[in-house]
Image (cartoon, rainbow, N blue to C red):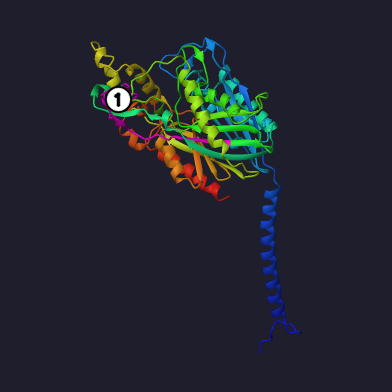
Amino acid sequence: MQRDCLTTSIPQRCTNRIFQFGLLIAVIVGLANGTEIQVAAAEHAVFRAGASKVKITPPLGLEIVGNWGKPLATNIHDDLHVRCLALNDGSTTIAFAICDNVGIPRDVFDAARKLIDSQTDVPPANVLMSATHTHSAVSARNNREVDGVVVLDSYQNLVARRIAEGVAKAVAAMKPAKIGWGGVEEASEVHNRRWYVNDEKLLANPFGGVDKVRMNPPRGSDKLIEPAGPVDPEVSFLSVQSLDGKPIALLANYSLHYVGGVPSGDVSADYFGAFSEKIGKRIGADSSSDSFVGIMTNGTSGDINNYAFREKAGKHEPYQRIDEVSDLIVGRVAEAYAATEHHDWVSLSAATQELELKMRKPDPEMLRYFASLQDEGQSPANVHRLASIYGNRLRKIAEGPETSSVLLQAFRIGDLGIVAIPFEVFAETGLDLKKRSPMSDTFTIELANGSYGYLPTPAQHKLGGYETWLGTNRVQLDASDRISDVLLSLLNQLGQK
């Protein structure tokens, strides 16, 4: 007869059972204690934040880029900066470095990462660097090579050094802090700039063909039918405060291309800089101190500007619209900020992935067309005004690499997701990422970690238009889908941590 294991005379098999039972209890208790330890660790961890801004104002005499002409910089209207924010949850540090520039190539950002790695303890992969896309800054896009090695020019080196300096200063300034985030909609300043029109003359392209949509058609024209895509009206923001509630920094994100109205030759950070300088006063930052840092990042605005195309263009004084737009957005964010809950601690995590994309190449028909433009007797009236520019671009593209690797990033701040894309991204891609993100709130910072041109969706490629032209867009036609898939995968990974 089998003896019960609770009798005084205990055979070996009962001893084993008691040992196994005890081990199970120990495991259960250990797991419970482990959970308590993790909770206790989170309770005792101190959330810290620091911010900085460092000038990247260029010397006069360099070319201002962003439009077809390249006037020389003759006046500094307002200084350009790299504005930085560093966050730490007790074990993980992430940082943002947002530069007043139209677009910065990956080589410059990579140079900054090496400096950050040597000067701080922040993992370089945990730093998101981006350009704001102001059209009134000098170029940081020089592509000079010596013996096949990229050599940065003096301004590119300055930008790389100042990015690293800004991140180091933000990290050094970190102190116990609270963090919160939110968003508010402001649709009045975002308009899709790609339109269906009923005049074929407005749809000609530099390749001798006809598109289905027109970028920036004549305003107030009776030839307008409807916009070819959506807008994202949300102004997202991330706020950090000291433990006694004093603002340390506010990073905002709006899917508006830029505003403009800057005189030729003037250097300006556009509305991105104006917002950054104004927001502190509206949310109660110490006006006697420059320790508060406001930051505006560019959302998915590759097909968005602030022209109300149904209306005739009005006359404005220089910088008038920059002031109007920045005042409006500052006011809207300040209203939402007042109701934002700030947390003593949230967890942070980051993930990155390289994605190799195929580069588009001109087809034989394109090359034949541009070759035909060299024929004598070719009438300028029958040739698109940008044909020579795109002909030159196609020759360079034909000789260029077959593929390019782009760096994609995702960050989790509590239940807020932030993703980074190195292109000028269409609004519908940003809206789709928000919709499919596993986080309760998500926004995209574009022109981050590189500047590879426009990123239309496959559906928008079929419509043609400036942003889809080879030479404006350079990567495979489904690149936006591939990028979105990678970013959603990274967000899902972070959501499981």
Going by the numbered disc 1, the residue's amino acid type is Met
What residue would you read off at disc 1? 366
Residue found farthest to the right: 8
On the image, the x and y values in percent for residue 68 come to: 40, 16
Magenta-highlighted residues: 209-238
Element at label 1: helix
On the image, the x and y values in percent for residue 280 come to: 60, 28
Q: Is 255 above or below relative to 218?
A: below
Q: Is residue 409 visible?
A: no
Query: Is 18 displayed left or right of 443 in the figure?
Result: right
Q: Is residue 338 visible?
A: yes
Q: How many marks?
A: 1
| Residue depicted at x 65% and y 44% | 345
| Residue depicted at x 42% and y 38% | 429
Residue found farthest to the bottom: 1
Mark 1, other Cα within 10 Å: few <14 / some 14–19 / many ≥20: some
Q: Is 139 above or below relative to 74?
A: below
On the image, the x and y values in percent for residue 164 come to: 63, 27
Query: Is 263 displayed left or right of 28 in the figure?
Result: left
Query: Observer-nearest residue: 369 or 64?
Result: 64
Query: Is 8 displayed left or right of 1 in the figure?
Result: right
The answer to if 415 sits in the magenta stretch is no
Give the dominant element type of the magenta stretch: helix, strand or loop. loop
On the image, the x and y values in percent for residue 131 come to: 52, 27
Q: Quadrant of residue 371?
A: top left
| Residue depicted at x 42% and y 30% | 188
Q: Is 383 above or below relative to 441?
A: above
Q: Quick one: quadrant of the N terminus?
A: bottom right
Query: Observer-nearest residue: 292 or 158?
Result: 292
Q: Quadrant of residue 166?
A: top right
